[in-house]
Amino acid sequence: MKSTVATISLLLTCVPALALAQATPPAPALSLTTGLSFTSQWDDETHLGRGVLVSVGVTRPFASRFNWEAELSLARHRRDSGYLEATGTPIAATGRVAYFFTSPTKLVRPFVSGGLTLTHHRGYFVWKEIILGPDGFPMEGADIRKDWRLTKGGWEIGLGMNIRGRSRMWWRPEVRVGATHGNRDYAPGVDTLEAPILTIRGGLVVGWR
């Protein structure tokens, strides 16, 4: 009799717990991401060069077809056209939302995204001074260097696709375009770099759940 009562008590305790566990959906999976991209940068008038961008971040679903994402990126770009040299190092923090066109069960999930950025951009221009030569004709003189340092908010849009890999890994080829705020706005103390700063990047992000 005691064993029967104990068995019934155990069932009354375990069965509701198991039912509750099955009824409660699993928490959305947080993924860590790292990425490598090629980037090209412009200010309002000038191409600032091309280079490599690396990133780290996190992403998490908040609905069946929506993810929120946060990312920190560091890039290095350079242009050397002979008469003008530009070198810069932008650091950007990005928060965005991605919308997927297919359900989470699909192997390939195309998406579009949009968000806000905060970019700290520093670098320098180098060009040749033009002076009059001994014969009275213009000639190249010494190098002139102008540094810039700029911190501005901005926006970003992108598209790509998530491709499910083995185990907990997934892959994401993507293209993103963004710009800082500003309209022919000079960096403080610099009369060369003009906002907005436009960024185009294309590359691959890898995620782990």
Image: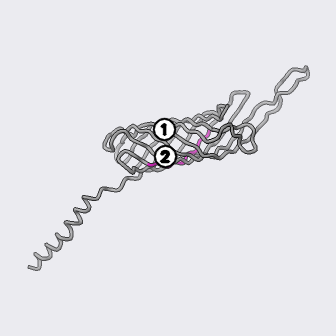
Q: Is residue 187 left or right of residue 34?
A: right
Question: In which quarter of the view is residue 41 placed?
Answer: top right
Q: Secondary structure at mark 1?
A: strand
- Front residue (pair 75, 113): 113
Q: Which residues are magenta?
A: 68-76
Q: Predominant secondary structure in magenta?
A: strand
Check the image and report above or below for 136 versus 23: above
Q: Amino acid at mark 2?
A: Arg
Q: Is residue 61 left or right of residue 176?
A: left
Question: In which quarter of the view is residue 171 placed?
Answer: top left
Q: What residue is disc 1 on?
A: 158
Q: Earlier in the sequence, mark 1 or mark 2?
A: 2
Q: Residue at x 54, y 43 (%)?
A: 54
Query: Which of the numbered marks, if any, corresponds to residue 121?
Result: none
Q: Amino acid at mark 1?
A: Gly
Q: Is residue 75 magenta?
A: yes
Q: Are dots 1 and 2 in contact, CB under 8 Å?
A: yes
Q: Is residue 184 magenta?
A: no
Q: Residue at x 8, y 79 (%)?
A: 1
Residue 148 position within the rendered picture, expressed as x and y whole percent measured from the top left: 71, 42
Q: What residue is disc 2 on?
A: 96
Q: Residue at x 73, y 27 (%)?
A: 83
> Does the rendering let one see residue 209?
no
